[in-house]
Amino acid sequence: MTVMDAEPIFPHELRDAWPALSRDERVESFKLVPHATADDFFISLSAQEKLELLLAMGPGERRTWLRLLPPDDAVDLVQAADPEDRESLLSELDETTRREVHALLAYAEDEAGGLMNPRFARLRPEMTIDEAISYLRKQTREKVETVYYAYVLDAKQVLLGVVSLRQLFHAAPAKRVADIMERDVVSVTEETDQETVSRLFTEHGLIAIPVVDDERHMKGIVTLDDIVQVVQEEATEDIQKVGGMEALDAPYFEVGFLGMLKKRIGWLLILFVGEMLTTSAMGRFEHAIQKAAVLSLFVPLIISSGGNTGSQASTLIIRSLALGEVRLRDWWRVSRREVMAGISLGLALGAVGAGRILLWQSLFDSYGEHAARLALTVGLSVAGVVLFGAVTGSMLPFLLRRLGLDPASASAPFVATLVDLSGVIIYFSAATVLLTGTLL
């Protein structure tokens, strides 16, 4: 059966099945989507998914779909392609779009310049409202993709203000654009980091943000749909790093088996070596374990309480740094807060641990005549390890950010491994001090 004979597939049906389809199945299924709805479905795909479809098409069909994309989406697609495919893709674009794409490729992917669309609605301040609305109609018929706002520029393309469509339609026809425009415009420069851009969208509730150079010449706009994709990618990358691995940079099933192993083995080896140090630390206290085997029963309790606390603190600070709620200069305030939290949490958990030992002793006589000293040792050790975990977990993200590294690298497994080592040392040191002459 040919494609012409096959039943059409509607976008919502294909979108549900898309993740489970192979590359060839995606191409064949896409050809069955009705032309009236295929455009929107194609644009909704990720850059990598668009690229796969285009490379499977013939030159004429590829050109048609590629020219459907606005410049910022075309840039994302070209950047996703292998170097040997980029020139052929660029050659399929019309001359104007090709120049715009080449200009955007000069910017880093994670900067506002790399995210922006150079096509935006523009007005002159001296226009009347009627002239402005008429001019906007003309721009939307041409190549302006987004008309959430119209940006007011002078003859040198310097950004003067912004007007919304609502303001234009509510204003008297004879008024000038300069009379109704907002002059205090939230904008970013071409080098502004994408995380900063995303925070501005959240703080100001905007749909688009203009990008300007150092002299306020307007270069383009970053739209909300662009930044939503960026935020999703950033969150995915951070979650994967917090899980103790490198970011995949692609959907799970699109990463090859060897590639997946490569992404995961690095951190696992580091964490494994870290746990070997914990084993070595326990070896130094072997004599204590031999004299009082009961001490070994509480090792998992001690190290897990510190690791869990450290993971909590690390996750809280990583996310707060990402959202801009906490900055580098706040490290001292955070450290004081986490010291107090660590002491409070440690005393609470330590009391529960000590209480459990005393309860079991009274009910089952589990720990012998020195149960009270053992309970004190475990309780104080838990308090100390929890305090260490809270401080370490909260400060590591600051240290990494200060060194220019991604705070998400202070992953929960890494913090847990570090606290495991310190937990063993704290526990057996406390036991040596408190139990020498009794159990030891």
Image: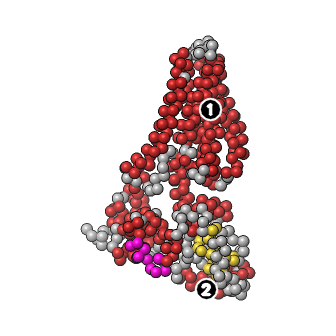
Describe residue 83's horizontal placement relative to residue 354 as left or right: left
Q: Which residue is drawn at the image coordinates 67% and 61% (left, top)?
A: 203
Distance between the alpha carbons at the discs numbered 2 and 1: 69 Å
Q: Is residue 354 magenta?
A: no
Residue indicated by mark 2: 134
Which residue appears farthest toward the right when viewing the image?
179
The picture places residue 255, in percent across and down from the top left corner, at 40, 54
Q: Which residues are magenta?
A: 87-98
Q: Which residue is drawn at the image coordinates 40% and 51% (left, top)?
A: 259
Q: Secondary structure at mark 1?
A: helix
Return the residue nearer the eye: 256 or 36: 256
Describe residue 26's horizontal placement relative to residue 277 as left or right: left
Return the residue nearer the eye: 403 or 142: 403
The picture places residue 192, in percent across and down from the top left corner, at 61, 64
Label ID, residue 434: none
Asked if disc 2 and disc 1 are in contact, CB closer than 8 Å, the reply is no
The picture places residue 160, in percent across and down from the top left corner, at 69, 77
Q: Which residue is drawn at the image coordinates 62% and 75% (left, top)?
A: 218
Return the residue nearer the eye: 193 or 22: 193
Q: Is residue 94 magenta?
A: yes
Q: Amino acid at mark 1?
A: Val
Describe residue 197's horizontal placement relative to residue 279 as left or right: right
The numbered mark, 2 or 1, whose residue comes first in the sequence reads 2
Residue indicated by mark 1: 385
Describe residue 93's horizontal placement relative to residue 383 as left or right: left
Q: Quadrant of the N terminus?
A: bottom left
The picture places residue 52, in percent across and down from the top left corner, at 38, 65
